Amino acid sequence: MGHDSTYTNQKFKVVGTRVNRPDGVDKVTGRAKYGADAYAPGQLVGLFLRSPHAHAKIKKIDVSKAEKLDGVKAIITSADLPDLTGDDRDLTDILENCMARGRALYDGHAVAAVAAIDMQTAKKALKLIKISYQKLPHVTDVDQAMEPGAPIIHDFVRDRKTGKPSNVCKISQFGHGDVEAGFAEADVIIEKTFKTEQTHQGYIEPHACLANISSDNTGELWVTTQGHFGFRSTCAELLGMDVAKLKVTSSEIGGGFGGKTHVWIEPIALALSRKANRPVKVVMSRDEVFRASGPTSATSIDVKIGAKKDGTITGATADLRYTNGAFPGFWAMLGSMISFACYDIKHVKSIGYDVIVNRPKVAAYRAPSAPMPAFAIESVMDLIAAELKMKPIELRIKNAAKEGTRASYGPTYGPIGIGPTLDAAKNHPHMRARLKKNQGRGVACGFWFNFGGQTCVDLNIGIDGSVNLIVGTVDVGGSRASLALIAAEELGIPYEQVRANVGDTASLGHNDMTDGSRGTFSSGMATIFAARNAITVLRERAAKTWDIPLESVIWKEGAARATGKGNSNRPPLSLKELAASAPNTGGPIAGHNEVVADNAGVSFASHICDVEVDPETGVTKVIRYTVIQDAGKAVHPDYVEGQLQGGAAQGIGWALNEEYVYGDDGCLQNPGFLDYRIPVCSDLPFIDTQILEIPNPDHPYGIRGVGETSIVPPLAAIGNAVSNAVGVRMNHTPMSPIRILKAIEDSKA
Amino acid sequence: MGHDSTYTNQKFKVVGTRVNRPDGVDKVTGRAKYGADAYAPGQLVGLFLRSPHAHAKIKKIDVSKAEKLDGVKAIITSADLPDLTGDDRDLTDILENCMARGRALYDGHAVAAVAAIDMQTAKKALKLIKISYQKLPHVTDVDQAMEPGAPIIHDFVRDRKTGKPSNVCKISQFGHGDVEAGFAEADVIIEKTFKTEQTHQGYIEPHACLANISSDNTGELWVTTQGHFGFRSTCAELLGMDVAKLKVTSSEIGGGFGGKTHVWIEPIALALSRKANRPVKVVMSRDEVFRASGPTSATSIDVKIGAKKDGTITGATADLRYTNGAFPGFWAMLGSMISFACYDIKHVKSIGYDVIVNRPKVAAYRAPSAPMPAFAIESVMDLIAAELKMKPIELRIKNAAKEGTRASYGPTYGPIGIGPTLDAAKNHPHMRARLKKNQGRGVACGFWFNFGGQTCVDLNIGIDGSVNLIVGTVDVGGSRASLALIAAEELGIPYEQVRANVGDTASLGHNDMTDGSRGTFSSGMATIFAARNAITVLRERAAKTWDIPLESVIWKEGAARATGKGNSNRPPLSLKELAASAPNTGGPIAGHNEVVADNAGVSFASHICDVEVDPETGVTKVIRYTVIQDAGKAVHPDYVEGQLQGGAAQGIGWALNEEYVYGDDGCLQNPGFLDYRIPVCSDLPFIDTQILEIPNPDHPYGIRGVGETSIVPPLAAIGNAVSNAVGVRMNHTPMSPIRILKAIEDSKA
């Protein structure tokens, strides 16, 4: 594992060490409580009835028989959910996605829900609910949905120009310069179309919650989520509650990767609880997770790049068409922002088309919308390099964005890492390793914005000097360890003296989700400020103890030290000593911070991948994989490496195997892990990583987000590697055996 | 219900209103989660094996058969609990009380504990544990325990003078002046001995907890307690954990009254969990609650009071002997401090003897140690009045303490309410009501210190302007409502906009217990400071929005208002508006406070009681009862009245029925609610109350503690009333039918 810390001058004592994770033992012994592990006395089982049709009018729902079944305590349909969303279209869509209103818009769309005393009764009740559907024409393919005459899914979505109903809900454009002029300067132009199929985040833990509302409209929700504060806001709005009166507690999370940033079952579970006057637990089956939670978009992307003989890219365009599922989104917008973010291009334009289809509502998936344009663009980069007889990595180095480059999506970059990651890739031993027959190597780059946002941290020092840190960002990848390291660093105490906890929504002010790789960046910032706040209190207590002015007390190496004339002989007062005397010096010692953590710092990755393709079966084996990423300060290098490896692993699955397969009836044909194949351990090589600690100047420790960027390059890296191995350009993910064989066949024809 | 607010000039908008309690619906519908309502996957049932002997040497414990029983996951004896308490004798005693070490010191003393997969297995396992005891001589009566030759319970307890082993673990003396000189001035002297029997708090919810420790020595404890922070400290110390690594969550509490300020089962539940590597739930049976949690002291008290003809008390002494149970305590010390606190006496002395007996370790019980001396002293006051032919209330008014009086326990009083409560009693219609045959009226006074202590509050304002208040004092009597009222008052918003929550130990800095009537006093103070802190942030945000200096923004009636030249036309910015714009003005808005809340303000009560005694059966019926108490500002008058009524009700039970009955074998004969009779609804009249809002000058709102004082006078008030009804002085509680009949008989003899 490489790890380059030479980019920063800051010296750390505990930050950067590979300490034990605080939740490790709990997770391997089963003590950790996940979404399905909560229990409330008298709790009911909640189950959903879901549409078997891709698109259908709901003519009538008859729950009378089900309601009469012994043990059924509540049944909810859209009629039980008054629309309180007002003018907020996004919120209306969330409500209608949680429970169909008049029409079922995709296979798996919830149409009713039942709360009963046990699973058997709930299942029986679902069978007794009679629904009469009138099937409507459907469309699931993004290109077909844009064709004239395609079935229109929402009447309120209109073509910007004609004003006529359309499935294109948003058109977004980014870029600068004059692309036609750019192409005119080019010596070589490559234009090509790519498709990527829809994938799912594949988190091991299904959505699960325990909802409990009282008749006084106060409630509690235990839920597996990436953002309990956001869930609180959404659920409270949908159900007409004050946010302060809904307490949401986040469970341990068995993976989210963006898919647990949206509500699916939770508002309905709360509505069931409210109607039944009992706690209600809902746990999705895997079938439901696939059919009715949010996968990523399927896309269709045209890329055109022109370059001079020396490799300088003169112009580039991308047209990006993204499925949004059955409700409007902004996924192509994101994709069009990201497309050319790695490069310094004078004339560049990307247009995103967000398209509604009869599929589940798309959700964020780790660097959402980014891997698809990277697949298209990084493939075309290789084609250009081949045409120019340049090494692909040299073409990328030549055009890499740098400090001062105007990004294709608008801003001007500060210090960034795309150049260094490419240089490191170029110099990596992996690049010089010999390849054998049927093997190919691919290189690709990736980018992610990283987010900041609203963050709150409390830090409480116990009587024995041990420290509780309360943060509001769900720990999805080790942030409790990294934040404890940061608190220990600031306070000058050992890591083991700090315990980081994720607080419930009552304990802290609003925290944005753990998404956009913001967890350690933003809660880390708030932790630093909260700790400094506590240090001021510690200094005050020492000053009071010594009866000297505050200004004469400094904090160093875990202790208050008296400075100035006549004070230097005083022995320092350690944190433990000050904590022990706190009851007599003013009470408990704490630090607090509420902040909007801006400027999370963009990040870049360059990946190198070797594959071996069996030309008989089309099966691809990844034989070597190296991730090099600009990570900012790596607070806990193990977890940074884990993030880089995890992103790459998911990208590899996406590249080679994973896809939603829809039948002609618009129904999902593979809603289970047997038919939707995510990589297992034996499918993957050891994924090597190299961290480049290029500091984020806007964070006190130089921290950037690290979790997402490394899912961006794999589709393209594998695409390039497979293309090099089989001698045929791949333009459709997943590059499953059947698609590879077909590509080889087509090329022979 | 009387309520006199004329003592204060402060005007309040919402404080003082009788709003709905936030936990009301949950408590009546069963949603509220008590100690036994928690559940963790894989949890075991924990059960205790308890000594059947009052005093016995434990010669051998053989757990081998029990350990082999299928489904038994852990067995704990004192051998599994290394003594980590060092020099801390109190902590050692707690440890040895939780699990006997070498000797069983009382009937019910825990000697072993088992964790098994279900109740049946656990019960079976208890039967398989073989213990060989060697019975030792025992003593349960306080006077007998002080006699020479009494069985000695602890070798380390020594007589102060002789240095010989003794059962008297502490002798405390308070007072001032020269009592002999005082008695010399007296025209009348009365001297009398009283006894009170041991009672239990009788909380409806037994002790219960769910303990969960991981092999990395981090843990969680869900528990019914009055003080989860204190439980955390004690358990962490006993088990060798950092306090920050043990997260304690307080459940709803089904009564505590002091009995849930001490650990009984919790360290053992944690030890079982650690050994079994599984969560362990322990719920005490009622039998165990009586035998092995902490009742109050039984006492034996001599009182001597001398007065002049005009009623002026010239001298007073009290000798107080308190059982402490099997371990040293300070209950007689407390009793000797309290004894003469209501009166302004020139020469006064009280001596407390804390005595060890073979009974369960005494715990706090609502105004702990206070009702017993009040019974004795207020009875003698009536005897003096009778002798002097004064009305009892006039004697009390004449000698009542006032601002500037030097209290018998040391300090000089500020503004206090004993005089006003006596005046109010004198003028109360109850005092003029006619009595019938066999009826009698009694008046008595009571005092309680009230405590303050360490307190932390966080206040978080949600995006919709609803407010979460996080406090660390367990809500035993409506403090969530009173603290929400206080936050609403400070912020200038409706009560309904605030939700008060009790935070777990990870969420806040250390909070002292909800005891000493400190909940609303101390968390109210911290709430005020936290809210003022939040108001500063709100003003800053408004100043930023308006681009004017902070000094030009005031907070009034729930909104920021611009002041000064050129600013008066700006429309105010309400809390809701500032909350909605918070993400763009600096992030979430919060206020925090950590404080040592000193000067809780003493409180006094005067009670009037009418009883009717059936001379045939000795049964006493309380026919009218009036409580008048100096309450400071009554934040939520309903709850203050509830506290006054609750205290009186418990005092009535103590006075008339409740007692621990020990057999000659030293075993408790009535460990259940059938034989230990607490008052039920039909036993009590409506208890009328009158609140006198005499403000506490050391609290911003004038708040004093209110919860305890009114358990102090009932024993004496009823004693005086019964004595007046039957014409015989009662000197032993409970004044059960049999004791009354005996007193009547004795007087005839």
Image (cartoon, coloured by chain):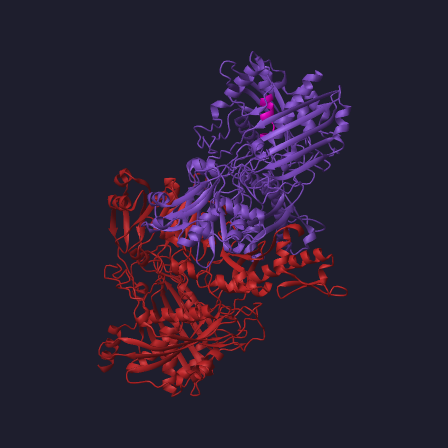
Chain colours: A purple, B red
Q: In the image, is residue A213 above or below residue A175?
A: below
Q: Can residue B307 be seen?
A: no
Side of B449 relative to B77 (left or right): right
Q: Looking at this view, is B329 or B682 the one in front?
A: B682
Q: Main secondary structure of the magenta part?
A: helix
Whether A716 is among the magenta residues is yes
Quadrant in the rendering for residue B358? bottom left
Quadrant location of the C terminus of chain A in the rendered image: top right
Q: Can residue A393 be seen?
A: yes
* Position in image of residue B653 (x %, y %): 33, 69
Quadrant location of the N terminus of chain A in the rendered image: top right
Q: Give the extent of the magenta segment.
A: A710-719
* Position in image of residue B299 (x %, y %): 34, 68
Whether A68 is among the magenta residues is no
Quadrant in the rendering for residue B140? bottom left
Q: In the image, is residue B673 above or below residue A325?
A: below
Considering every residue shown, the one lying at the far front of the view is A149
